[in-house]
């Protein structure tokens, strides 16, 4: 499984050496990334009206507004395709995202310090740690180009937030074992990695 994932990323890196993302590729990438950001923001919005300890609240509050900002900037920076088939495929991919991540479960009710909250944090952590495009691009790509700059800024911000996520995941006191926690984290990472790999395969077919 790991070798398969590495092969897909290696093929994507090879593709990007020969092809900078055009309108179709940018549309596929942005459609996916904006869906991830919007889903996370929808979940996080409820934290603004519920009581939470200060550390998790301040982190989730910042993440909420950063997701909105980064999604908006990426939307503005993208050269959107005129091909309707690209959007049809992207819409199917978004449905697959919601079905596999079960993100809609986290929209219901309020969070408390329980297994559901831990599962959400694990999913959010997977979004930031598994979806990484910049390492697949050649070093000589123009980082000042709007689309590339938006991707770069988003992944830099992800790197900052991951450290706080790890702290919350590690320190959260829950009535589940360490092995169960690790299993939840690994499950979410596997799901998100699979979705990202499907995106890469689609982009490389453009």
Image (cartoon, rainbow, N blue to C red):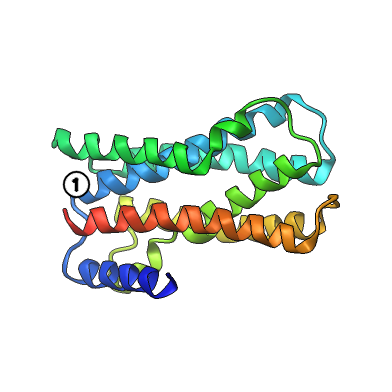
Classify the position of the N terminus by image quarter.
bottom left
160 relative to 149 in the view: left or right: right
The total number of labels drawn is 1
Q: Quadrant of residue 91?
A: top left
Q: At 16% across and 69% down in the image, what residue appears?
A: 18
Q: Nearer the viewer, residue 187 or 36?
A: 187
Work out whether residue 185 can be spotted. yes
- Establish if 22 lies above or below 62: below
Work out whether residue 157 can be spotted. no
Q: At 39% across and 40% down in the image, what residue appears?
A: 96
129 relative to 17 in the view: left or right: right
Mark 1 neighbour density, 10 Å: few (under 14) some (14–19) many (20 or more)? some
The x, y position of residue 2, in whole percent, is: 44, 72
- Establish if 67 lies above or below 148: above
The x, y position of residue 23, in whole percent, is: 19, 46
Residue reaching furthest left?
83
Q: Nearer the viewer, residue 52 or 172?
A: 172
Q: Quadrant of residue 137?
A: bottom left
162 relative to 95 in the view: left or right: right
Would you name the residue on which mark 1 appears? 24
Q: At 23% across and 34% down in the image, what residue appears?
A: 88
Q: Nearer the viewer, residue 127 or 79?
A: 127
Q: Quadrant of residue 90?
A: top left
Which type of secondary structure does the marked residue at label 1 adopt? helix
The x, y position of residue 44, in whole percent, is: 63, 34
The x, y position of residue 198, in whole percent, is: 33, 54
């Amino acid at each position: 499984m790991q070798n398969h994932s590495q092969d897909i990323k290696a093929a994507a890196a090879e593709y990007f050496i020969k092809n900078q993302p055009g309108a179709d590729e940018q549309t596929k990438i942005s459609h996916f990334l904006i869906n991830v950001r919007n889903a996370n923001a929808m979940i996080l919005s409820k934290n603004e009206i519920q009581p939470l300890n200060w550390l998790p609240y301040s982190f989730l509050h910042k993440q909420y507004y950063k997701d909105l900002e980064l999604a908006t900037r990426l939307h503005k920076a993208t050269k959107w395709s005129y091909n309707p088939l690209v959007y049809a495929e992207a819409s199917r991919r978004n449905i697959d995202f919601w079905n596999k991540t079960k993100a809609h479960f986290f929209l219901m009710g309020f969070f408390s310090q329980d297994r559901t909250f831990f599962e959400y944090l694990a999913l959010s952590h997977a979004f930031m740690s598994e979806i990484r495009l910049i390492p697949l691009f050649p070093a000589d790509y123009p980082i000042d180009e709007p689309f590339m700059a938006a991707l770069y800024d988003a992944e830099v911000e992800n790197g900052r937030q991951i450290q706080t996520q790890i702290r919350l995941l590690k320190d959260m006191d829950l009535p589940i074992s360490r092995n169960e926690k690790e299993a939840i984290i690994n499950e979410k990472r596997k799901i998100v990695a699979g979705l990202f790999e499907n995106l890469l395969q689609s982009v490389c077919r453009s």
